[in-house]
Image (cartoon, helix red, strand yellow):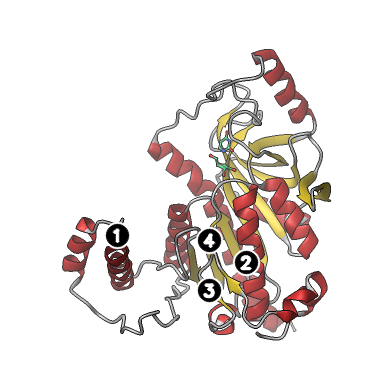
Amino acid sequence: MPELSEKLAQTNPGLEGLDVDFLYHLGLSTADDLKGMFGDVKHVAMMGSGMRAWDFARKLHEETGMPIQRLEKPREDGSDPGPLYDLEQAQDELSVARLGFPDVRKRADRLREFIYTESDLPTPIGKTERFEMYKVGDTIAVSHGMGEPSHSILLHEITKMLEYAGATGYQYYRLGTSGGIGVEGGTVVVADKGYNPTGNPTYKLHVLGEEIELPSGFDPTVAQEILECRDEVEAVMGGILSSEDFYTVQARLDGAFCMITEEQKMDYLNRMHGKGIRAFEMEAAGFGAFCKKMGIPAACVCVALLNRLNGDQVTSTPSQLAAFSDNPQQMLIRYIKRKAAAAKAQPALD
Ligand code: R2B
Ligand code: URA
């Protein structure tokens, strides 16, 4: 085990007792060269889907020229990953590989890695069953699944990973989707706070069966600087409400069952709007609480897919949805570029 960082020694000194810490959902452990792979990380962009994390990594690489980090971990079977086929042959084979069987799946993983490497596209680091993680320059792009429980697992493991790696001064971002509250589809909401469904800026969880409430907030400077990267994107600062469900707790009337009336729904959403809340999703409160507790500067940047004051169904076409998802990604790419430029300019000022 590497020596515990100052942060982990404070937040969980019990980790000292482990011989190896297995970051199970990432498929990495302290036996890997975490320092070599992640010691330089400054930005961690988290988003619900693996496809979006891959796409963000691809765009970041294309727009900044920062290098894609490839898997450095030795293969379990000790085999040489090196060139297998020509690209076209590999693509054909991957398109017919049936992913259900372990042997075929392993081969498909190898083929995908080969194709992506040859095509200069991001390859995942670690395993991809639960989360997909990519690294471009000093930035990690990683998926977190849907909802606070899934996101919380990623937050614990990735934070330990970065602390074991000796990374310093890193920041977290969630680039998500949401239902706008009084804002239209395509508008980006940068969170000042994360709210639980009662409308308080806290995250509630059970510890030893007791309910506890952690304050949930984001770094105001990071939030403001990201908002200033909006350029032509419609973006506002506001509260983000999060819930443990997309239907019932988000006051939708179109779930498999429904326990409320249209009037009750509108009253609830209008009350939340009155508190300065502009989006409803499933992670902000837990994310803001985790980062506050760990002292990690963070921002939650969510695009609205619809205005919930006008309906419940997400009716946008796939290309509209892709364009919406691109909005928070472009804002963060601009922010990362500005930070890199400022860091470059810094020595000259000294
Ligand atoms: C936004 O979108 C997902 C549900 O569709 C969920 O992860 C969220 O917060
Ligand atoms: N994600 C959510 O959680 N809610 C919405 O309404 C849209 C996306």
In the picture, the disc for residue 28 is: 3
- Asked which quadrant contains residue 84, the reply is bottom left
Q: Quarter containing ligand 1?
A: top right
- Of badges 2 and 1, nearer the viewer stands 1
Respond yes or no on whether mark 4 lies under 8 Å from ligand 1. Answer: no
Q: Residues within 10 Å of mark 1 (few under 14, many from 20)?
A: few
The residue drawn where x is 69% and y is 78% is 346
Residue count near mark 3 (Cα–Cα under 10 Å), binned few <14, some 14–19, many ≥20: some
Earlier sequence position, callout 4 versus callout 1:
1
Q: Where's residue 262, x and y in %? A: 64, 15
Badges 4 and 3: C-beta atoms under 8 Å apart?
no
Q: Counting other residues with Cα less than 10 Å from the Cα at mark 2, is it few (<14), some (14-19), or many (20 or more)?
A: some
CA distance separating discs 3 and 1:
23 Å
Residue at position x 22%, y 57% from top? 95
Q: Amino acid at mark 3?
A: Leu
Q: List the residue tagged with mark 1.
A: 101
Residue at disc 2, CB closer than 8 Å to ligand 1: no
**What residue sits right under mark 4 in the picture?**
142
* Above or below, 84 relative to 251: below
